[in-house]
């Protein structure tokens, strides 16, 4: 059957072959065909569902060409005959593909149909090769079209931007800026029209964009500042915004990418200033604005001081003009960043934490309703941690409360409520916050956590003074006077004072040091003075201060250390003086206690006139701030005195130096040593033994006070008396020379005691 079909196809002419093998179904039916053609049509229909439907597009062009040739035979037979004679390959362009390979035909039952499909597949391969060649040529053209940015081009762009900026010029600069930014991440700007290969060109291009692009875009969009400076003019209001939106979006994305790659603080500051100018443009493009907020948050929490301030200004500007969209997520991210950066507190990190507190408070001041929602959730979270610690009483739960993050969060919310007072929305949060802080103080009321108690008392004092709310802070401070024995001598001396501002817990070694009690007295003096200053103009100050006066007097009777009694006595005198002042002013008042309006007016008048305690506090505060700055920076209070450093030398080294110095005076050193050896044996305590004992004492007691040194000197004197009494009465000349040499004498360095 296959051979028969093959002979019939061979007997066909070119015209018959074209009409029978490549006609469409409609044309095949319309033609007057023989049974041979009907057989071909049936086979064609049977295989169309399997093969031709898949390769319909592949064979489309070839069949169209065949149809055109068949129509050409009917319309212009002379030209068709000319083609047959002169250009046979045009008419039979796929004959070789269909019938040239005999091996291929042996494996196929339907040569006519398969020839058609095979020719279509070959055409498709050729088309793919052509398309690939076109793509490669396009890529090569693009690579050839890449323009290298030079300094001269940047200068030309600068001049053109200053004269008359156009959208086309802005597009060119934007594409060059994109290529420059791509080099910062090692991308090389593969899809960019321009290429930046030199570092000097990169710097010049970025500097040009930071300085001139903002003004140029304003001129292109024809934006004019509003008369009301508080109202922000959005660029999307310009009729030219749609035309330039794509280029502006590309440039804004490049600025954010550049900001994420920089490490030098000065360059970051310059880019942040530029981003601050571009905030109105970012507000029109939400996706780019979210990317910018992410980078600003990073700089606000971890950057240098100037970068932090600039990042905060940009965040504040975004929130002020788009509160509905950005305020809540930005507040949440800022609070999380604040908590993460408060995990460790040191003298270097403390200014950064204070800056984050103040700036975050300013952000919360933008919307009191949103602030209430955030404060309620986070204060409740702090209260839950405290409740778990009080009920479970485990070490892990205690640590969840007694850490820097918890304490700094308490202080943050105290600062927020104090700054935003008076606020009817936030007023209900005062009482729960005070209860959480008081519960934190009472959780572990031991001496090791006195620094944490100081921090909590300082936060309560801030909250009480700013919100005109009475909070009992003094009892937690007076309790320390009862628990600590200030008369007990310290177990060991310390080189530096303890900085209570950067610690929460004292070690057992710290509790034995003299610096612990010195710092404790200073902290108690500071906190009590600050609290009484906040209540100095209160009409009930005498009654408020009475328990404190009684307890301070009791402390002065018991304490025998002058250094501790002096500040406490000074504080007592100032409190009593202020009480007498308020009592005298109160006796002249003509209103009753129940008249709240008159009481408030009286307190306001007293505050304006000033009290003895408030005047003293203002002078003390200036001096104390200087001391705190020294402590925060890690310096000692005595550092400015520039005391000389005393270096100890071992006694054996001193004796060797003395021998070298006086070697010429005494020639019989060896004889005197031999004679003196017998003298040492007769005595129970020899000078050698005393020297060894002194060396051990110097090594073990290097930190002891002068009492130990004076005792050593007395012991040396007693030993000398003992030896003198035990020595025989007659002395030889060699013994006299040995005594004259004085190998027992040594120079002892004097130390000044802290009491002196």
Image (spheres, rainbow, N blue to C red):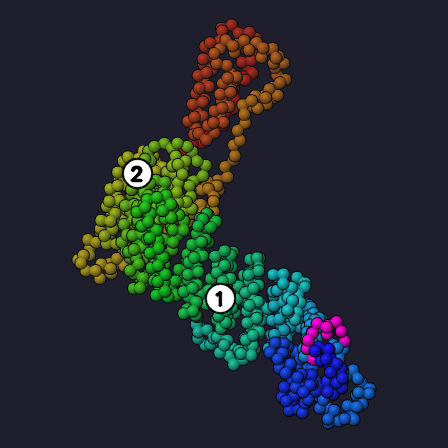
| Vertical comparison of 690 with 190: above or below | above
The x and y percentages for residue 279 are 50, 69
Residue at mark 1: 290
Residue at left 48%, top 60%?
A: 297
Give the labeled residue for mark 2: 483
| In-image side of 382 versus 79 (left or right) | left
Is any part of residue 530 visible from this angle?
Answer: no
Where 417 sits versus 742, above or below?
A: below
The extreme right residue here reads: 86
Per the model, the C-alpha gap separating discs 1 and 2 is 55 Å
Category of crowding for the residue at label 2, using alpha-carbon neighbours closer than 10 angstroms: few (below 14), some (14–19), many (at least 20): few
* Sequence-earlier tag: 1 or 2: 1
Magenta includes 103? yes
Which structural element holds mark 2? helix
Q: What range of the chain is rendered magenta?
A: 100-112
Q: Residue at x 76, y 74 (%)?
A: 102
Q: Specify the quadrant that holds the C terminus.
A: top left
* Image position of 715 (left or right of 258): left
Residue 59 place in picture, x, y as percent: 67, 80
Q: Is residue 315 visible?
A: yes
In which image quadrant can residue 191 be found? bottom right
Asked whether 408 falls inside the magenta stretch, the response is no
């Amino acid at each position: 059957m296959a051979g028969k079909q093959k002979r019939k196809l061979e007997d066909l002419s070119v015209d018959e072959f074209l009409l029978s093998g490549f006609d469409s179904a409609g044309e095949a039916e319309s033609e007057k065909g023989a049974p041979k053609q009907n057989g071909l049509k049936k086979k064609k229909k049977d295989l169309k569902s399997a093969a031709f439907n898949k390769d319909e597009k592949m064979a489309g062009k070839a069949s169209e060409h065949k149809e055109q040739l068949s129509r050409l035979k009917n319309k212009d037979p002379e030209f068709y005959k000319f083609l047959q004679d002169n250009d046979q390959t045009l008419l039979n362009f796929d004959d070789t593909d269909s019938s040239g390979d005999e091996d291929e035909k042996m494996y196929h039952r339907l040569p006519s149909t398969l020839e058609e499909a095979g020719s279509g597949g070959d055409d498709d391969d050729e088309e793919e090769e052509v398309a690939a060649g076109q793509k490669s040529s396009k890529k090569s053209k693009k690579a050839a079209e890449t323009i290298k940015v030079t300094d001269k081009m940047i200068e030309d762009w600068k001049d053109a931007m200053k004269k008359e900026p156009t959208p086309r010029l802005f597009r060119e600069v934007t594409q060059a800026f994109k290529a420059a930014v791509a080099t910062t991440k090692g991308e090389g700007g593969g899809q960019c029209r321009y290429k930046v290969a030199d570092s000097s060109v990169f710097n010049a291009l970025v500097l040009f964009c930071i300085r001139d692009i903002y003004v140029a875009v304003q001129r292109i969009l024809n934006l004019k500042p509003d008369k009301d400076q508080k109202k922000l003019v959005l660029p999307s209001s310009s009729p030219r915004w749609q035309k330039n939106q794509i280029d502006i979006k590309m440039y804004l994305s490049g600025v954010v990418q550049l900001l994420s790659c920089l490490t030098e603080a000065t360059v970051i500051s310059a880019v942040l200033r530029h981003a601050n100018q571009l905030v109105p443009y970012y507000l029109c493009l939400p996706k780019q604005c979210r990317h910018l907020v992410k980078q600003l948050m990073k700089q606000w929490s971890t950057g240098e001081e100037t970068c932090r301030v600039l990042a905060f200004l940009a965040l504040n500007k975004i929130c002020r003009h788009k509160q509905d969209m950005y305020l809540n997520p930005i507040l949440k991210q800022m609070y999380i960043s604040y908590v993460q950066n408060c995990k460790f507190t040191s003298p270097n990190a403390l200014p950064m934490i204070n800056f984050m507190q103040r700036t975050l408070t300013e952000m919360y001041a933008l919307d009191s309703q949103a602030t209430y929602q955030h404060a309620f959730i986070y204060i409740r979270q702090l209260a839950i941690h405290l409740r778990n610690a009080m009920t479970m009483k485990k070490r892990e739960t205690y640590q969840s409360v007694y850490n820097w993050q918890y304490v700094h969060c308490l202080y943050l919310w105290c600062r927020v409520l104090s700054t935003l007072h008076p606020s009817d929305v936030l007023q209900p949060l005062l009482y729960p916050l005070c209860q959480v802080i008081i519960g934190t103080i009472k959780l572990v009321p031991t001496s090791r956590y006195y620094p944490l108690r100081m921090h909590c008392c300082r936060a309560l004092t801030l909250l009480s003074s700013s919100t005109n709310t009475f909070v009992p802070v003094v009892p937690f401070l007076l309790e320390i006077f009862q628990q600590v024995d200030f008369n007990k001598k310290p177990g060991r001396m310390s080189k530096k004072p303890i900085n209570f501002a950067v610690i929460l817990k004292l070690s057992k070694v710290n509790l034995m040091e003299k610096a612990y009690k010195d710092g404790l007295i200073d902290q108690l003096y500071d906190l009590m003075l600050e609290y009484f200053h906040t209540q100095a103009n209160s009409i009930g100050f005498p009654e408020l201060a009475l328990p404190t006066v009684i307890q301070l007097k009791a402390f002065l009777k018991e304490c025998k250390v002058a250094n501790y009694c002096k500040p406490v006595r000074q504080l007592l005198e100032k409190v009593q003086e202020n009480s007498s002042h308020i009592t005298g002013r109160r006796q002249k008042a003509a209103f009753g206690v129940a008249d709240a309006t008159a009481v408030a007016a009286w307190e306001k008048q007293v505050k304006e006139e000033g009290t003895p305690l408030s005047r003293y506090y203002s002078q003390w505060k200036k001096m104390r701030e200087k001391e705190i700055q020294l402590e925060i920076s890690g310096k000692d209070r005595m550092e400015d005195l520039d005391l000389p450093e005393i270096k100890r030398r071992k006694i054996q080294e001193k004796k060797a130096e003395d021998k070298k110095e006086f070697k010429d005076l005494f020639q019989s050193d060896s004889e005197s040593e031999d004679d003196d050896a017998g003298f040492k044996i007769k005595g129970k305590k020899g000078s050698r033994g005393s020297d060894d004992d002194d060396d051990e004492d110097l090594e073990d007691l290097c930190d002891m006070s002068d009492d130990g040194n004076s005792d050593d000197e007395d012991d040396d004197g007693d030993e000398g008396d003992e030896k003198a009494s035990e020595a025989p009465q007659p002395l030889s000349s060699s013994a006299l020379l040995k005594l004259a040499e004085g190998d027992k004498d040594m120079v002892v360095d004097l130390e000044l005691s802290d009491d002196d």
